[in-house]
Image (cartoon, rainbow, N blue to C red):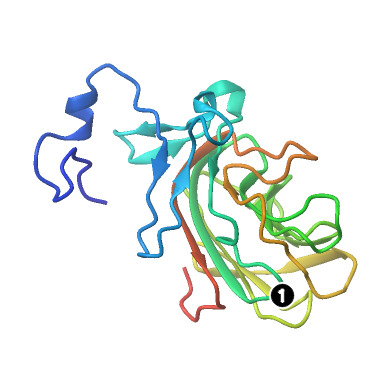
Amino acid sequence: DGNLTIAPDGTGITLATWLGAATGYIDTWYDQSGTGNHAVQNALYDGTVYQPIIDTTNRMVSFKANSGTCRLKLPNGTVPSGDSSYSVVFKHNTIAGTAFLGAGTAGTTNATNSFGTSGTNYNNYWWGNDATTSAGSLVATGNVVTFKYTTGAYNNRVAFVNGTSQGLSFSGATAVRAGTTINNYIGFGDSTNNNYLNGELYSVYIFNTNISKIF
């Protein structure tokens, strides 16, 4: 909520006025936690062609440009790794792809930690060890989705959609996860399966603990 302006203190003209008819490409989505884990896309990473676009009218970030392959690179370790606990919350608009957030080593069992969709449901996969909501046609524009995990067991995962607890089905190996710190992205899950978002996000929250609050 609030206004998008071009001054750091919220004053000045609005971003929409400043842009006019121009397209606003995003090279940095700033981390608001104070830890400096900013999401970046520029020539040092995948290239400016993959920069998402700011939608000033709806106050969201669109990853639909460049055939839906846009993404933002996060510092290694932003998504909790190893077998640490975590909570991830995201609000999306339309989606045509499969991944909102991803990290880790693709192709190695339990070494990834990615979040997105699986058919008409939401999915948190570790590679070979998925947790998928089982409510039928659950994916819908404007949903707020939460996945939480407590260290120690593959099935210590819970999910909520718009604050409502969801049943989960688990597949694959049952070993504890061992997520690696590399390949942290917003809008991209893993390179092996080309899991891109191809949609829009309003917000992404990443916590390195199983938080008590329900979204």
Residue depicted at 90% across the width and 67% down the height = 173
Establish if 135 lies above or below 94.
below
Residue depicted at 37% across the width and 50% down the height = 30
Establish if 189 lies above or below 66.
below
Q: Residue 191 location, x and y as percent? A: 74, 39
**Three-letter amino acid code of the residue under disc 1:** Asp
**Residue 25, quarter of the rendered image:** top left
Q: Residue 68 location, x and y as percent? A: 59, 28
> Which is nearer the eye, 187 or 60?
187
Does dot 1 land on a helix, a strand or a loop?
loop
How many numbered marks appear? Answer: 1
With 141 as the anchor, is 83 left or right in this view?
right
Residue depicted at 33% across the width and 37% down the height = 58
Residue depicted at 18% across the width and 40% down the height = 5
Direction front: furthest residue: 44
> Which is nearer the eye, 110 or 20?
110
Q: Residue 61 location, x and y as percent? A: 42, 38
Residue carrying label 1: 83
Direction top: furthest residue: 21
> Which is nearer the eye, 150 or 182?
182
Q: Judge the density around disc 1: few (<14), some (14-19), many (≥20) Cα neighbours within 10 Å.
A: some
With 129 as the anchor, is 48 left or right in this view?
left
Direction right: furthest residue: 173
Establish if 1 lies above or below 129.
above
Q: Residue 34 location, x and y as percent? A: 35, 64
